[in-house]
Image (cartoon, rainbow, N blue to C red):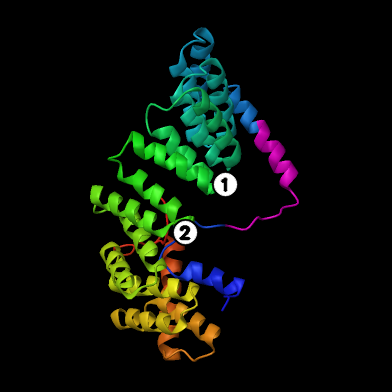
Amino acid sequence: MMIPSGAVAALALLATSCAHRTQTGILVSHHKPVQTTMQRQVQNAVDAGDGDAVARDLRQRMTADPGNLAYRLELAGHYRQQGYTELAIEHYRLAADRFPQNSKVVLLLVQTMHEQHMTAEAAALLDRFLSKHPAQTSDLPAWLGILRDETGDYARGESAHRAAVALSPSNAKLHNNLGYNLLIQGKRPEAVEALRRALALDPHMETASNNLGRALMSEAGPQQRREAIAQWKSAANAATAHNNAAAILIEQGDYAEARRELEAALREHRNFFPALKNLELVSQLDAKPAAVPTREKKAAMRRSAVKVWNAVAGIEEKPRKPGVTLATRE
């Protein structure tokens, strides 16, 4: 059975107790052209050094010694740190034009472009650079793999990740990134192998543990499910582990087994809000009532609302172990 698109969206949000990245809507304002003009004027003023003693000093040094790469990178880094990312990109571009073989400049330029969501352009730039200047370290191919993944070019992303691993075979993060890419492509056995290697190098790497759990669950066998739950338990707790297993079973359309995992999660933590919401979702999908008292669910929702309010109001809570994010990259 196909899951409705709205249900999938809800599942993606509720299958974990925290999100690695969030998406926000676009706010349309009638004053946007004025704001854009003002922002450009501010950026131009900063670029000229007006009111920014650090930028003014660096520009003067760069003018006096145009061949000094350190001054150029320091100025671009200053703009980047201050939030003037477009200006930083311009200065990194100028540095790249003057020092076309410098891999550090290209890496900084690509990273800053990525911050501006110029993913495809950054990937093309990095691709051209590597075609002329073979990588000596794993940094550039690792970033190329990430950028290709984000543009949906997974097959070529895999080749970039493998190149990065070949240059730094003891780097756990690179094996995790390769495993993530393979998992997206549906190459589960290879993904499991890469993620196991990442954990062999860094047994405490939560991201790799979470990704391995997802990869094992994708195989859908009882043994793999038990191992996946064990992986999630090691990264978070039992309630989160059973809830994550249930989330994947919902994606696979196995609602009966998803219910069993959600019941296990609620036995560990009877008011675990993600599990309560996923149980509600399963009830909508299979038209069977959720075996959870309404009063208990409302109490969990109230507690969740209080946590949100505390976070907005800046009220500190006692530290607790974070939840798990499925299929994420380090």
User: In terms of secondary structure, where does tag 1 sit?
Assistant: loop
Q: Is residue 25 magenta?
A: yes
Disc sitting over residue 186 in the figure? 2
- Quick check: marks 1 and 2 in contact, CB under 8 Å? no
* Residue 147 in sight from this viewpoint: yes
Q: Residue at x 46, y 12 (%)?
A: 68
Residue at 56 percent of width and 24 percent of height = 91
Of residues 213 and 23, the one drawn nearer to the viewer in this rendering: 213
Q: Quadrant of residue 269?
A: bottom left
Residue 51 in view in this figure: no
Which residue is found at the position 53% from the left and 17% from the top? Answer: 59
On the picture, is 223 further left or further right than 29? left
Residue 151 picture location, percent across and down? 57, 47
In the image, the segment drawn in magenta is 24-41
Quick check: 132 above or below 295? above
Residue ranking furthest to the top: 64
Q: Nearer the viewer, residue 233 or 25?
A: 233
- Which amino acid, by three-letter code, is at mark 2? Gly
Residue topped by disc 1: 151
Q: Is residue 28 left or right of residue 59?
A: right
Residue 276, quarter of the rendered image = bottom left
Which of 173 and 70 lies nearest the eye of the viewer? 173
